[in-house]
Image (cartoon, rainbow, N blue to C red):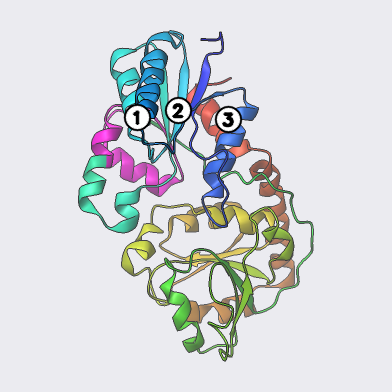
Amino acid sequence: MSKNRLFFIQQHLTDTFTHGGVGFKDAERVLVSLNFKPLVFPQPNSYSIYAKLVRFGFLLRWLTTLPTNAVIVFIHPLHSQLSNWLVKCISQYRKSITVACFIGDIEGLRDGDRELLTKEKAFWLHFEKFIVHNTSMKQWLQSELYNKTIVMCEFFDFLAATVQEVRKKKDIVAFAGNFDKAQFIWQLPNVSTNTIFKLYGNSKSNAFVGFRNVLFKGVYQPENLPFVIEGSFGLVWDGMSMDKMYGYHGAYNKYNSPHKLSLYIISSLPIICHHDAAAAELIKKYNIGFTVGALDEISNKIENISEEAYVQMQQNCRALAVKITSGGCLTGALKELGVIK
């Protein structure tokens, strides 16, 4: 084992994404830039007896040879059982090693799966240091786990170029995301105002033909989307209703800072979200958009925003984008956690 003391469990570095998973990939890219060494199990897609034995050998090797002052960061959820075993065993049997858990997703909350959530909470009991998205997620975790060190990253880092375009204030709203989780989009034709919605994501190109106020704009690679996304505002919304955060995915917005927040910020798109969403606090803190209780309220809110206020929101987005595109969100959280200087 090398003298390097900084490590992370690699899961996403070589993956390709068309939506939020790119946030996990960029997090691992940030760790690499900070001189964290990836721990990768060999032959991850092979289920042969030989491959399983080889991977188990790597687990034993890392468990016994990692430096006594090592730091290991991993992104939850871990989808490999061996990775789960590794971080739990290190936390239990190598007390001098620091293990930090970056909670990228809480699958039990997201999917309304109580059994899975119980397993997730039991897994987290093994660790002492956590990075979470925002204040709402931090408060929720503090109510579930006691005497843990918890810091916030606020936004996912998005290692793409910042868009410098000066947008004009119009009643045009972009939405980028997973349409399977965003069933509310099929209600958008019922929005009674003149708001135009431009959608980016996986869908059949003819699925929105005939909708007076909905345009499907296609699928783009994440790093290219900031340069092609059209509109004056970006929408953070999920679930089954355009009137409230309804359904498991809608309710998850109370805790989650989705990757699309970062997408909109680096695209110079001020953000719209539900006033009970976790993102609402960040939008108000940094003055990068506004909140509503239902999508029907958007048009009136836009109308009442002055041109000067809209320009200021864009400028605030561009200031935040410098941090987001340089890996500053995760880097800052790791420094606050005390695992790097």
Dot 2 falls on a residue whose secondary structure is loop
Spatial CA span between label 2 and label 1? 8 Å
Separation of residues labelled 2 and 3 (CA atoms) = 18 Å
Q: Is residue 143 above or below residue 72?
A: below
Q: Residues within 10 Å of mark 2 (few under 14, many from 20)?
A: many
Circle on res. 128: none
- Residue 41 badge: 2
Return the x and y of residue 210 as percentages of the image width and height: 57, 91
Q: Which of the two discs, 2 and 3, labels the residue nearer the N terminus?
A: 3
In the image, is residue 243 part of the stretch drawn in magenta?
Answer: no
Q: Quadrant of residue 241?
A: bottom left
For the point 57% across and 23% down, which residue is it? Answer: 36
Under mark 1, the amino acid is Leu
**In contact (CB < 8 Å): disc 2 and disc 1:** yes
Q: Name the residue beneath numbered marker 3.
A: 31
Badge number at residue 82: 1
Residue 143 visible in the shown view = yes
Q: Quadrant of the C terminus?
A: top right
Three-letter residue code for mark 2: Phe
Q: Is residue 315 left or right of residue 92?
A: right
Residue name at image x 56 percent, y 42 percent: 25
Residue type, mark 3 in image: Leu
Is residue 155 something one can see in this rendering?
no
139 within the magenta span: yes
Mark toward the start of the polypeptide (3 vs 1): 3
Looking at this view, is 126 or 85 the one in front? Answer: 85
Magenta part of the chain:
120-148
Crowding at mark 1 (Cα within 10 Å: few <14, some 14-19, many 20+) = some
Q: Residue furthest right?
A: 165
* Residue lying at 61% horizontally and 28% vertically, measured from the top left: 32
Within-10-Å neighbours for mark 3: few <14, some 14–19, many 20+: many
